[in-house]
Image: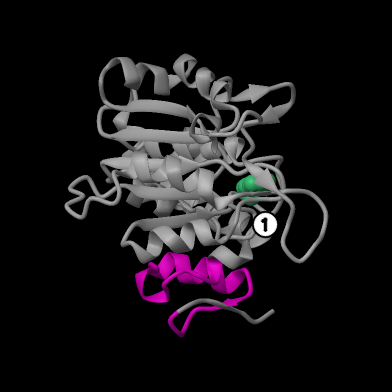
Amino acid sequence: MDIDIVSVFPEYFDVLDLSLLGKAKSKGLISVHAHNLRDWTHDVHQSVDDTPVGGGAGMVMKPAVWAECLDELLGLPEADNTDRPILIFPNPSAPLFTQQDATELSHAQHLVFGCGRYEGYDARIPTYYRERGVDVREYSIGDYVLNGGEVAVSVMLEAITRLLPGFMGNPDSIVEESYTGGNALLEHNQYTKPASWRGLDVPAVLLSGDHAKVDRFRRDEALKKTDRIRPDLIAQLDCHALSKADRKTLIELGWEVSGDHPRRIS
Ligand code: JAH
């Protein structure tokens, strides 16, 4: 996978060499290049922003500099673009980046990330590339505003690259995550030894050696925890994919499980 990142602080991404991502780089699994947007300016001040049209506070990143940079990284305007790059902009006003997006993007050959700064970037930049057939994505990583897209890009990169085959030390943990539903439910609590620590005991069923009972306990714990703190995730479950035991637990938690998705009734 080839990853290009455009930022006015490309050095921010030097830390990627220290992480697992650095190992994947040295293994040749991925290549990461962080570019300085100012390298595509022509003026002495290397200006990348301007005042907002219509007025208001702060500055907006101007489209012309971005376009010179992105045309080059995306290989435009050549029509026979074989590597089909995906262009991604972090944006606090965009749809949430989810595990499903990470999985989908982990299959791409070439990702180009654009990091905005200031109050954001001119909205015509994503429009322009979409109109030219580029797969352009804008994502938020959560309901908060950052000073720029760099932190959001490092979050997305970590979520994407850990899914690459051969990336992780232990591929089993990825399989386990996905068959337990990825982000469908929150994970049950985890415990290690000792069984009793400072007066706090590990739930006895986990020491029973009865694997069926352990699985059921963990599944119920996941359902209860998700009901408490992310009921929106329960409401997205597919009722037809629930086991009899799952239905029983959800009914006890106050959900109706007869339609396509669970509905809270008490
Ligand atoms: C802030 C450009 N939801 C995460 C997120 C993503 C991007 C930005 N903020 C928050 C951002 C300023 C300029 C992007």
In the rendering, at what x and y percent does residue 37 appear? 53, 34
| Residue found farthest to the front | 43
Position above or below: 214 against 242: above
Instruction: Give the residue displayed 48% in from the left and 14% down from the top.
Output: 18
In the rendering, at what x and y percent does residue 211 appear? 37, 42
Res. 247 visible in picture: yes
Instruction: Give the residue displayed 45% in from the left and 56% down from the top.
Output: 137
| Residue found farthest to the right | 57
Check residue 139 for magenta coloring: no
In the rendering, at what x and y percent does residue 110 appear? 30, 41
In the rendering, at what x and y percent does residue 229 appear? 67, 57
**198 or 55, nearer to the observer:** 55
Q: Which residue is mark 1?
A: 229
Query: Element type at marker 1?
Result: helix
85 horizontally vs 122: left or right: left
Instruction: Give the residue displayed 37% in from the left and 46% down from the top.
Output: 71
Based on the displayed image, in which of its 4 quarters is residue 46 positioned?
A: top right
Q: Quadrant of the N terminus?
A: top left
Q: Which residues are magenta?
A: 234-260
Position above or below: 262 against 5: below
Res. 187 visible in picture: no
Instruction: Give the residue displayed 30% in from the left and 27% down from the top.
Output: 30
Position above or below: 19 against 55: above
Within 10 Å of the Cα at label 1, are there few (<14), some (14-19), or many (20+) other Cα atoms? Answer: few
Q: Amino acid at mark 1?
A: Ile
55 horizontally vs 211: left or right: right
Q: Quadrant of the C terminus?
A: bottom right
**177 or 247, nearer to the observer:** 177
Position above or below: 260 against 100: below
**94 or 84, nearer to the observer:** 84
